[in-house]
Image (cartoon, rainbow, N blue to C red):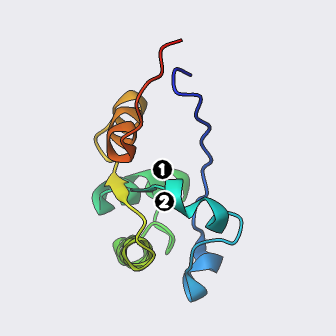
Amino acid sequence: MQFGLRAVNYPFIADDMSALKLPKAIEPYRFKTFGLTIDIERLVAIRNERFADSDYASSEQCLNELQQVEAMFRREAIPYLNTSSLSVEEISTRLLSMSRLKRKIF
């Protein structure tokens, strides 16, 4: 709230993987877009809680998706951050630091 920022979460899903690119809705905001990633072990654990022993939760599926998304971030020059061990506050602090935004005091 101190910076007047708004955030949007756009999760990439299996349907996005065939032609992975920056979504059209995000394209106008690419200059202030950041990607968030996660360690494969953490993603597998989360997905196993939702759909145990499924292809969706397999290590191979998670690794493939993470590699594709991170490659897209690099190709599109979107800075990204691994959030596996970070709290929401730590994520926001790091993103603010990466963006070089300064707090305005009124």
Residue 15, by quadrant, is bottom right
Residue 33 percent across, percent down from the top left:
51, 56
Q: Quadrant of the C terminus?
A: top right
> Dot 2 lies on which element?
loop
- 76 or 8, which is in the foreground? 76
Q: Is residue 68 left or right of residue 5?
A: left
Is label 1 in a helix, a strand or a loop? helix
Hey, which residue is sitting farthest top in the picture? 106
Compared across the picture, whether 103 is left or right of 25 comes to: left
> Identity of the amino acid at label 2?
Ala
**Mark 1 residue type:** Glu
Asked if 99 appears above or below 44 in the picture, the reply is above
Which circle marks residue 40 in the picture?
none
**Residue placed at 42% from the left, 32% from the top?**
88
Task: Write down the residue under mark 1.
Answer: 49
User: Which residue ends up furthest to the front in the rendered image?
Assistant: 106
Residue 44 vs 68, above or below: the answer is above
Which residue is most to the right?
25
Question: Which residue bears the numbered disc 2?
Answer: 52
Image point 36% across, 76% down: which residue?
67
Q: CA distance from mark 1 to mark 2?
A: 6 Å
Where in the figure is residue 20, as x and y percent of width and height?
Answer: 55, 81
Q: Are marks 1 and 2 in contact (CB under 8 Å)?
A: yes
Q: Is residue 90 above or below residue 75?
A: above
Q: Nearer the viewer, residue 91 or 41?
A: 91
The residue at the point 58 percent across, 73 percent down is 22
User: How far from the left and from the top, in percent, is residue 103?
Assistant: 44, 24
Looking at the picture, does residue 75 appear above or below residue 96? below
Report crowding for label 1: few under 14, some 14 to 19, many 20 or more residues within 10 A (C-alpha): few
Q: Residue at x 44, y 51 (%)?
A: 46
